[in-house]
Image (cartoon, grey):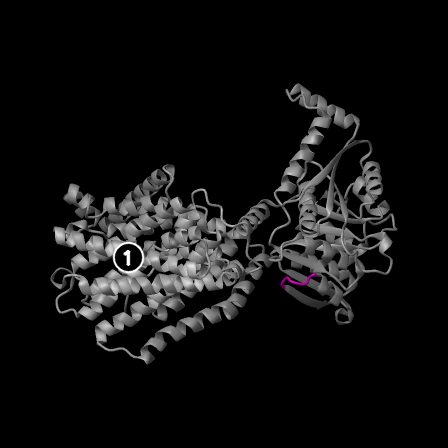
Amino acid sequence: MAELIPIEEHELLVFWVQLFVILVFARALGWMMRKIGLPGVIGELGAGLLLGPSVFGTVWPEGFNWFLNEGHEEVQSAALLGIAWVGVALLLVVTGFETDLGLIRKLGRPAALVTTGSLIVPLIGGLAVGYALPGDLFLAEGAERVNFALFVALALSVSSLAVVAKILSELGLMRRDFGQITVAAGMANDVVGWLMLGVFTGLATSGEIGVVQILKTIVPILVFVAVAMTLGQRLVDRALRQMRRVEAGVSGALTVALVSMLGFGVVTQKLGVEAVLGAFVAGVVLHRSRFQHDRTLEQIEGLTLGFFAPIFFATAGLRVDLRELGNATAITWTLVIIVVAIVAKFIGAYGGARMAGRSHRGALALGAGLNARGALEIVIATVGSAVGVFNTVAFTAIVLVPVVTSVFASIGLRLVVRGWDGSEAEQARLSREAALDKNIVVNTSRLLMPSDGDPASIAAAQILHFAWPEEAAATVITAGESPDSADIEPLLNTLYGREIEHRKVKTTEEGIADIIVKESALGFGVIGLGADELDRDDIVISTRVDDILSVSPIPVVLVRRNRTLGARRLPAAFARAVVPIGGTPASRAASEIAFNISANLGTEVHLTHVITRTDANALLQGILNRAGNQRSPEEVGQGLLDQSATMALGLGVETKQTLRSGEPADEILALVAELEADLVVMGANLRRPDGRPFLGHTVERILRECDATVALVLMPFDL
């Protein structure tokens, strides 16, 4: 019966020393590269070269032999490469998280043409080099020239998605248009590379290949991707949803991510394609899940970039032995291989990009970025050696390709993008994404909207639809004793253009709030609620709304529709909005909503800050003065208005400002009347002192007395 064989104490000692030394050198050299403005991956690859036989093995042979644990190299290599493969799998999960399939679909033609050009031209160049290389110097004994040329062509034609992604990420270029095209083309390069490796290996070992054998390799991969994006997506969604239900937090989401990575990897490895492809697909699926925890990517990135990725890249460089290139002829032909690899890939990617109508700078960036090679080339060299195609000189030359081309890609990309911000449309998209990343409530998180088709909930849907980006999907819940009888078609029409899920839940009136609150904890960013007419003093809004506000774990956007609408469900548009400004997160969240509505509808935005003359304010001002801050209340208020105006300009919205003094509710109501404003957007802390919601006297008075539509952003005070 098979059993686990324990590693000897000395082997364990060497293994820990290897990890320690490799990590220290990789991180140190990576830091040095970043200090001079280059991606850290260059230093991490360089660390492997320094610690490998080329430098370490030459300067101190005895120490190098101990470092590799001479006589036990198989055990040490297996352990170290195991860590490295986990590293590249995690790196590709991160890449999957950052891959925007929607954006890639929009860029489909450029991505397809760049992929085609970046594969075909290097394949042709590689075949030419493969036939031109001196056989007595590079071919293994008994190897056929055609097999040798095919392996050389394959090694020169593919890119490394992992290295490409690392370089783009470190340079902050992942979200650029060319960055997403590069990721799409890199993914295709990897997939095609693994498929061709299987085909060429079969040809080298059996001497024959046919259509059936090719289909047996390709079809299972296509089926895997299709199943992963459908059934796999549902399974991941279910697992993440359960983690939220049991309040497992980020650790539960991280467990689902790692299990998905390993499970998908097992499938692709079994299909004859490396597990890293499965890891990438897992990252895409995990990112698409609406139940994903916000901090999952942060946790995986920290673990990957801090430990696993440096080990992987350094290990790749560790396998290069420049001593094998012992004469001028070998060095010359190795340089030819590297030059052809760079030039052919560059021409292919550049040509494909230009055919797709991309700009000259964009095409240059794609040509530079796709030149990054990595693990696949090392695997190709290893397999080529194992099947008797490459000798040791050819192996070293091919392994050297990813090291040099990755350096070229890093430096080339940095030079190409220097001073280039892309097209106006791309700049607008990036600016919008940057703003969304900084926002408190308006982002791409899913929207939760309870509704039975009433006008108030339709008004709430209108506010959320105009304020939130189209990428933010929405779930509409119709809960009650007769959910099938509710007419929510007008609400669904209001949300036209975004992904919508409509759920019907049969329950009692008392159970509606509980269902909505439980659902809100499953990955939603905000709840949109419509408020009925407020005419009772014993409740804040309504019994149902108050019950939700009492326990909601996430922000709530509460909308009380315009009183002058009568039977009409919605206003045609919002002409003027009043936005009270304070220094709280809730006030900033309200500004986010108002500015995005204005950006979409052209609504005129009036910012106002009301200075109150109370004993509390006087006491606060005295404390500030004693602390050395001599700013007056007027200066503080104007500063808040200016800060909000600057934030609005980031979205292309110009605002008007008003600094007023008096009782806040009186001044806000007066300003609304003076301007004939039809919208008020304000924020408030949602306090629950006795288990019931308390919005503050100013907010409750605005809700009861203002005729215009009132949109309140209520932030749970414990957030």
Q: Is residue 349 above or below residue 644?
A: below
| Residue 648 place in picture, x, y as percent | 65, 42
Frontmost residue, 355 versus 528: 355
Of the 4 image quadrants, the one containing the N terminus is bottom left
Q: How many marks?
A: 1
**Residue in view at x 64 percent, y 61 percent:** 498
Q: Amino acid at mark 1?
A: Ala
**Residue in view at x 61 percent, y 45 percent:** 439
Apparent side of residue 80 relative to residue 624 in the rendered image (left or right): left
| Residue 134 place in picture, x, y as percent | 14, 61
- State the image quarter where residue 51 is shown: top left
**Residue in view at x 86 percent, y 53 percent:** 564
| Residue 345 place in picture, x, y as percent | 33, 58
| Residue 616 place in picture, x, y as percent | 76, 27
Apparent side of residue 211 relative to residue 505 in the rendered image (left or right): left
- State the image quarter where residue 582 is shown: top right
**Residue in view at x 15 percent, y 64 percent:** 140
Badge 1 marks a residue whose secondary structure is helix
Q: Is residue 402 visible?
A: yes
Q: Is residue 358 above or below residue 131?
A: above
Q: Which residue is mark 1?
A: 341
| Magenta stretch in the rendered image | 495-499
Magenta-drawn stretch, dominant element (helix, strand or loop): loop
Apparent side of residue 627 relative to residue 59 in the rendered image (left or right): right
Of the 4 image quadrants, the one containing the C terminus is top right
Q: Is residue 507 visible?
A: no
Magenta stretch: includes residue 104: no
Crowd band around label 1 with a 10 angstrom C-alpha radius: few (<14), some (14–19), many (20+): many
Frontmost residue, 641 versus 111: 111
